[in-house]
């Protein structure tokens, strides 16, 4: 089973998954603001990340979805809100679509296109090399990926956390999930309410305009909230505001 921890004892339940660069410790700056009386939170690290480091896998959407449901089953959660960040928003969409009786709401933080980024072979191979490379190679990649009005110390911090919280083989293994394969079923609509939160300093494919275009047909009950002065990590860049938006949505 995935490594996870829980916070809160509320009747509402939210299962949080991590992104490509780090485990769910990205949520550490936001945890002090979480409502622990109304909502039960579970933070689960994907295979190869955080508390699930050293656990091998196929790194597919279907595998991560099964792992997430196993965590929910262990907690006794028959229904819950799924919270995905970046890479794991593909998994959140898949769960909401294919396991609609289990998912009452979905929160997508900085979601890539459900059809994937469509990386060609050369790009995919280059990113695999970054995933398995040294800090200097990762730093050059992050200078592009995390471009925007943030200090160099932010990128140094992200590199350190990337190295400390993930297995390089897993980082490389998940690349096709969001880089080429994307959501397996892009035709079946998602019935539950879906909240997408975007950072307008993020890469253009993950800003609000692109997110609306990518998701509005797939998610008829879609709400998009754009954080104007935020990049790809709202839980670290604007933690109180993110918590307020997510909790208001979960509590509806």
Image (tube, rainbow, N blue to C red):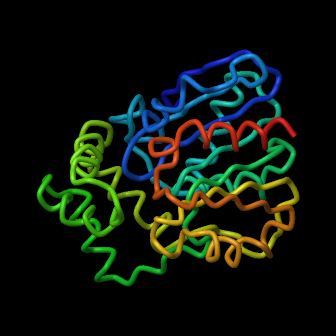
Instruction: Please name whichever residue, 126 or 58, is drawn nearer the observer in this view of the structure.
Output: 126
Tell me if residue 141 comes above or below residue 77 in the rendering. below
Does residue 151 appear to the left or right of 18 in the view shown? left
**Residue 248, located in which quarter of the rendered image?**
top right
Residue 175 position within the rendered picture, expressed as x and y whole percent measured from the top left: 40, 63
Residue 140 position within the rendered picture, expressed as x and y whole percent measured from the top left: 18, 65
Does residue 34 appear to the left or right of 50 in the view shown? right
Instruction: Please name whichever residue, 131 or 36, is drawn nearer the observer in this view of the structure.
Output: 36
Instruction: Please name whichever residue, 241 or 175, is drawn nearer the observer in this view of the structure.
Output: 241
**Residue 61, located in which quarter of the rendered image?**
bottom right
Instruction: Please name whichever residue, 105 or 31, is drawn nearer the observer in this view of the structure.
Output: 31
Which residue is at a point 36% across and 65% down the rendered structure image? 148
Does residue 59 appear to the left or right of 65 in the view shown? left
Residue 162 position within the rendered picture, expressed as x and y whole percent measured from the top left: 29, 45
Q: If the image is split into quadrants, where does the C terminus sit?
A: top right
**Residue 11, located in which quarter of the rendered image?**
top right
Residue 2 position within the rendered picture, expressed as x and y whole percent measured from the top left: 51, 32
């Amino acid at each position: 089973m995935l490594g996870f921890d829980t916070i809160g004892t509320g009747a509402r339940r939210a299962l949080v998954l991590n992104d490509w660069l780090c485990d769910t410790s990205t949520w550490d700056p936001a945890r002090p603001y979480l409502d622990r009386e109304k909502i039960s939170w579970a933070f689960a690290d994907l295979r190869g990340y955080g508390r699930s480091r050293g656990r091998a896998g196929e790194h597919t959407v279907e595998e991560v979805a099964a792992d997430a449901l196993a965590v929910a089953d262990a907690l006794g959660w028959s229904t819950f809100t799924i919270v995905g960040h970046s890479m794991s928003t593909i998994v959140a969409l898949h769960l909401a679509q294919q396991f609609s009786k289990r998912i009452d709401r979905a929160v997508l933080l900085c979601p890539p296109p459900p059809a994937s980024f469509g990386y060609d072979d050369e790009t995919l191979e280059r990113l695999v090399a970054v995933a398995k490379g040294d800090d200097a190679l990762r730093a050059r990649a992050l200078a592009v990926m995390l471009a925007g009005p943030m200090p160099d110390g932010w990128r140094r911090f992200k590199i350190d956390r990337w190295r400390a919280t993930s297995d390089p083989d897993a980082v490389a293994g998940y690349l096709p999930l969001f880089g080429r394969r994307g959501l397996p079923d892009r035709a079946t609509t998602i019935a539950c309410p879906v909240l997408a939160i975007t950072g307008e300093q993020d890469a253009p494919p993950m800003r609000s305009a692109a997110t609306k275009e990518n998701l509005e047909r797939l998610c008829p009950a879609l709400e998009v909230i754009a954080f104007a002065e935020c990049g790809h990590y709202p839980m670290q860049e604007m933690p109180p505001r993110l918590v307020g938006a997510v909790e208001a949505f979960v509590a509806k």
